[in-house]
Amino acid sequence: MAKSLMIQGTMSNAGKSLIAAGLCRVFKQDGYRVAPFKAQNMALNSFITREGLEMGRAQVVQAEAAGLEPSVLMNPILLKPTTDMGSQIIVNGEVWGQLNARDYFAQKKHLLPEVLKAYQKLSDQYDAIIIEGAGSPAEINLKDSDVYVNMDMAKHAKAPVLLVGDIDRGGVFAQLYGTVALLTEEERARVKGVIINKFRGDQTILDPGNKQLEDLIHIPVLGVVPWVRVDIDDEDSLSERLSDREASLIDVAVIRLPRLSNFTDFKALEGIDGVSVRYISSTRQFGEPDLVILPGTKNTMADLLWMRQNGLEAKIQRFAGKGGAVFGICGGYQMLGEQLDDPSGIEYSGTMRGMGLLPVSTVFTPEKTRTRVSGCFGAVSGIFSGLTGKHFEGYEIHMGETGSDAAIAEITDSVSGTSRTDGCHQGNVYGCYVHGVFDGDEVVETVIRALAEKKGVDPEDLGRVSGAEYKEQQYDLLADTLRKSMDMEAVYRIWKEGLA
């Protein structure tokens, strides 16, 4: 049975996911069979496994760092917020229900057996499990409903805990001290080390504070991890990646929808020198883009209404009317159509007019499409006519069906083996359901080359696309950073000693 080590944080976005990924890589490099685990994840950036099951993106990144195929055992519960008060609950990769926060907290104890079963299966297969917590273990108003998220999960797994604080937001000593102070005596005994994360500057300045903190909490500071710019997928809406920035030679504007999902779809575009990917949420930020992308969303109708109210819909319609290139993926594709119908109240209820840029209509149904696909573009016209015949791979996660008489591609469902058409195009407006459609080198290079030629930019002035080898280099860079900034001998000692 594996020995476990749990990474908890003083708050959301303290860097738990990245520290866990880095430790997965370190353990792998040192010859251990290591796997990640997070009992409950809340994110809209999800992933579909080879079996067609849905899980959180953070554990996919951690699995890649560990050299493993992602499995829903690594993230048995995924919460996908649909409104400010409710979420779709994914259990073992499949939709379990739609609940508001209060009802979910009341139901959590019934899901504990599923969490423990998943953890045990992993534990039977690996030497080490790196467990990631959620939010903060010191949310005293939520302690009774923890069950399997933070300290209760550490207890179930008999895992010692390393607590991560975010110095970039300020007040890191107060974060760490306050978190430890709010824990029970039994919980404090589980915390075997603290980590200061995202530091910039001269580390010696922190030394007096580290010593005082250790004297106050009687827990060692195991390291000060610098702010490291590793190019690794994010899953959180707080990601630095999701910001407006200065336009480059080729300017891509992604609409930052309130319920934006799967923004990793655009990682390949971001990996090209000379291409700027700007995430915008107002007409003021629109500028003069070469390509506008409508991304996935967990609530298509609500986010379309948001664009309608803030003027972005009209801005995009005028842009497309002048021949501008527009690409919609999943929910963004649905928005581009003529009509959205939700007779069962899956998202928003009723009927809503679409943007009218593609001759398609969508009907939302209770059944969720969740699968991996591969495909080939058919006869594509317009600015991206070069996509004709190009192969791609990706995955689908959506509620609703969209009919089209001008399909953009023929795809094969990798889970069921069935074939069908997908997507639509009209003029320079394109849409499809496939997340990851830009990931393949052929596709992304064709898209960027077409935009460059239209703008009069020499495609040779643009850098190369980052591939699989580049991703491996980034995981190694992260591991190297942890080795240099943390007391890894102490980390291994804590892991091996474990807890009863």
Image (spheres, helix red, strand yellow):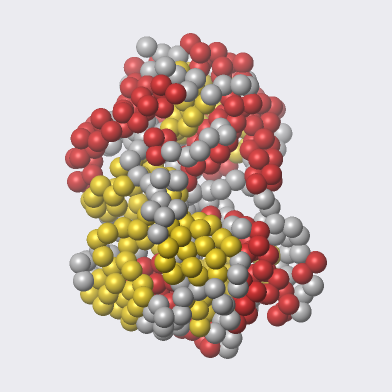
Compared to 87, does 164 lie above or below? above
Observer-nearest of 1 and 106: 1
Looking at the image, can residue 128 be seen? yes
Compared to 423, does 45 lie above or below? above
Position of residue 476 measured from the top left corner of the image (x, y, whole percent): 67, 35
Position of residue 269 measured from the top left corner of the image (x, y, whole percent): 63, 61
**Image point (55%, 66%), residue name:** 376
How many marks overall? 0
Quadrant for the C terminus, please: top left
Observer-nearest of 412 and 64: 412
110 sits to left or right of 393: left
Q: Which quadrant of the figure has residue 389?
A: bottom right
Position of residue 273 measured from the top left corner of the image (x, y, whole percent): 73, 60
Position of residue 183 measured from the top left corner of the image (x, y, whole percent): 36, 25
Quadrant for the N terminus, please: top left
Compared to 428, does 46 lie above or below? above
Q: Which quadrant of the figure has residue 385?
A: bottom right
**Image point (23%, 41%), residue name:** 105
Looking at the image, can residue 337 be seen? no
**Image point (63%, 22%), residue name:** 30
Given the current orientation, which residue lies at the most extreme bottom position? 322
Observer-nearest of 217 and 337: 337
**Image point (28%, 68%), residue name:** 364
